[in-house]
Each structure stands twice: as structure tokens, then as C-alpha cells.
Amino acid sequence: MYEIDFSVPRTVYFIGIGGIGMSGFAQLFRELGFTVTGSDRTKSKITAHLEELGIKIVYEHKEENITSDIDFLVYTAAISPENPEFVRAKALGIPMMDRAEMVGQVMKNYSTAIAVAGTHGKTSTTSIASLIMLEAGMDPTISVGGMLPAIGGNVRIGKSPNFLIEACEYTNSFLKFFPTIGIILNIEEDHLDFFKDLGEIRQSFHRFAQKIPADGTLIINADIENYEEITAGLPCRILTYSISDNSADFSACGVSYDEFGCGSFTLIESGRETDRFQLSVVGKHNISNTLACLALASLFQIPAGTVQSALSKYKGTERRFEKKGECNGAVIIDDYAHHPTEIRATLTSAQNYPHKTLWVAFQPHTYSRTKSLLPDFAASLALADKVVLADIYAAREDDPGDISSKDIADLLAKNGKEVHYLGDFETIEKFLEKNLTPGDLLITMGAGNIVEVGESLVNH
């Protein structure tokens, strides 16, 4: 396998440079003195930012984009072996690696490499940890899977030996990482277009935990069913946290919520009540995420006052319960939730947010996820008062013809829920503009482009 020599900057080409993860590392390599170029299918805010930094991008995958002066090439997991740039690079003998392999090599350059894993909550937890580390003056290099206002985007280049990143389990990408500290937030059924079942997913997380060296630390949510299976035989230090079990190393008591649903709690550390913390983001799930970060902060002996200062500044990332504006006197929030557990967490949080009627406009993400978790989607969406459904966002998949958003609608209607399967965005916008009333709360929800509906309504 090609080894990147970071002491000798070379020329690197990124296929799919506009992705949220790839773009961050394109910026990192540029900061390190490498000559960075790349390609993507379409222009976006992200590619515009990269071009402002002086990175040359082409917007069509063509074999002539790949020239012999490229020293190595990085590609996303979504790139097909038939991609003309991929084929050309292979023919020229240019060293190639996928994003996960590249990230793994980057991590080796940092003495403290923190990887945040879990079926969901990675972006929020990485963001909270980022602000705590920044507040503590640790000057970390950060790669986060969302736009974090505190760092002006999805990447921050630090000068210290501290590195912080999300670690995704899809296609076992995180098994190519080299963390010294790992965090596992939760383990549930997802990405069943790749994994066979939950057992295989749990096995993958166990293998991720095994990547942590003996002098490293694993922070794991004790609320994960049989979490001891994941930690079995690990030589590293293990810290547990829990939102419900006070026997964990880090847990919470005296949980309460303000008028906007933002939580506060008293930390119980090793069985002893310590400090009280107030969050500026909504929901029980963010209390759980914060407990993971408090466990991390303990490793670096960061004072409680510093942590609270960071928590006060954390207002969330883009597309995580993000207020977009109002329409007809109704508040419009956007949220990235695309897994039933995430939907449940977001809609439960919304119950504590001022509202008359809670609407959700949901766009399912991938056919395989919708089909495999269909009853769970219906059950979680039922927490809203009224549900509007868009067509499934295909992402990387082709339509198999045996699943659609109508299947979710049918289950909801069968259980007496008011549901409207409207399909396209234009129809959804017109319907909502007609039916939203003052005091309502609308959440546009999904990992696709449903955010555009809310933004359009706000701009009307």
C-alpha cells in the first residue's frame, strides 16, 4: 500500500472532492503544502469554498483529468471501478486509496487521535468535543461531518498533536483508522445494504474497539445492549457513560429542560455527584452525547468551568435541529435525522419546544434502509401530530420497485395518524404553505435535500 510522506508535499487528486468528508481533507492537504486538485459531479457551496482557497476542480469525471504528474489519488467509497478517472489512474499506475485509508494514514501523524463512532450522533458529539477542546486551548485538528460555525466549516487545521474525527462504520471504513481514543455512542441496525444484520454490525464495532492500543482509551455507552461483548478482551482502558444507569463511570441525575427543550443535568462521576451543566441544544440525546464528551474531557483533566463555557457556545451544527425561520407564523426547523432512532430523538425533543401542532415533512434516505426498517419509521414518525412524506432519496441506490414512501404512509394511516404522501417538493411546499398556521412547528427531516422545502417556505 502506498505510504504518504507528509514531510514531502506532493500532488494529490480527489475524486468526489465536494463531499463533506473529502473536502475537509482536501483543505488539510493543501494546508500541509500539497498541490490539491479534484473532481465532482456538481458545483456546491463546498466546492465554491475549495475553489476560493485555490483548489482546481473539474465538474465532469473524464479520463483526461488524470495526468501522469499526479503522485497519488484519493476516491470516495461511492466511486465505481468503472469511473473513467479511476480507470485512467489505474492504467497510469498512479497509487490510489479510498478516503478511509487516507484518513488512517493522516491519523498516524498525531499522538492523540480521537475517533467518534456510532450509528448516530457522531456529528453532534464530535462538534461538542471540538468546542471543549478548543475552549481548553488544545488546538486540535478537526474533521466533522457537518458545518460547525465555531470552526467556520467542516474542518479545522491545528498545530498540536491532537486530532478529532467522526468514524463511520459503513463499508467498515473505520477499521482503516488508527485511533488512540475511541468513542462508541450506540450500535443499531443501519446500512443493511452492506451489513447482513445487527450481529455483523456489532462485530464491526468490536473490531473498531480492538484498533485502540493498550495505552489508549475506549469510551462506550453502557446503554448499548450487552456492551460488554464489544469491550471483551480489550487491552485498553474502558470508560462507560449512561443516561439511565448511575453505576456507569459517567452518568446524569436531576435532568430538566428549559422552555426551549435545552437540557441541564448534574454529572455523576464514579458514583459521586459533581458539577451541573446546562446545554444550549435540545433533547435527551444531546445529554447522552455530552456525557461521552465529559468522559473525554476527564482524560485531559479539563476543568468543569471550561467545559460549561464550551457547552454554552455550542448551539448545534447545520441540519441538526437548526431553526431556518418562519412561514405563516409557524417556526421551521431542519434536522438531518434519517434513522428511526434519530427521528424519535428529534421528535421527542420537539415536544419540549413551544408549539401548537407538530408537523414533520420527512424524506426517507435510501430504499434499503426504508425497506429494512419500515415499521420503525412509521412508529417514530407517529410522534408528530401531522406527517408529510416526500419520495425516497435514492442516494447511491437504484429503485428496486418494491418500496416507496407510500408504504410508510399506509402504516401511519392504518394506525390513525394524519399523513399526506405528496411525493415532490413543489406539491409539499404548496400544501404546507396553505396549511401551516401561527404557533405550528414544522420540522423538515432527512439526510437528502428536504431542507430545500423549509428554506423555500421561509423565503416566500
Image: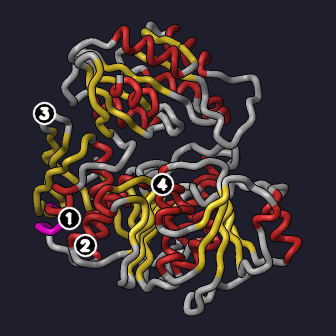
Looking at the image, tell me whether mark 1 or mark 2 is earlier in sequence order: 1
Helix, strand, or loop for circle 4? loop
- What residue does disc 4 label? 118
Q: Look at the image and say whether residue 307 sits in the magenta stretch.
A: yes
Other residues around mark 1 within 10 Å, as few (<14) / some (14–19) / many (≥20): many
Say which mark, if any, is on residue 269: 1
Closer to the observer: label 1 or label 2?
2
Say which mark, if any, is on residue 298: 2
Looking at the image, tell me whether mark 2 or mark 3 is earlier in sequence order: 3
Counting from the top left corner in percent of width and height, residue 362 is at 48, 26
Counting from the top left corner in percent of width and height, residue 338 is at 50, 37
- What residue does disc 3 label? 259
Looking at the image, tell me whether mark 1 or mark 4 is earlier in sequence order: 4
Looking at the image, tell me whether mark 2 or mark 4 is earlier in sequence order: 4
| Residue visible at 60% across and 60% down in the picture | 17
In magenta, the rendered stretch is: 304-308
Other residues around mark 3 within 10 Å, as few (<14) / some (14–19) / many (≥20): few
Q: Look at the image and say whether residue 343 sits in the magenta stretch.
A: no
Towards the viewer: 42 or 24: 42
Asked if labels 2 and 1 touch by Cβ distance under 8 angstroms, the answer is: yes
Looking at the image, tell me whether mark 1 or mark 3 is earlier in sequence order: 3
From this viewpoint, is residue 244 visible? Answer: yes
Main SS of the magenta part reads helix
Looking at the image, tell me whether mark 4 or mark 3 is earlier in sequence order: 4
Asked if labels 4 and 2 touch by Cβ distance under 8 angstroms, the answer is: no
Quarter residue 7 falls in: bottom right
Closer to the observer: label 4 or label 3?
3
Q: CA distance from mark 1 to mark 3?
A: 27 Å
Helix, strand, or loop for circle 2? helix
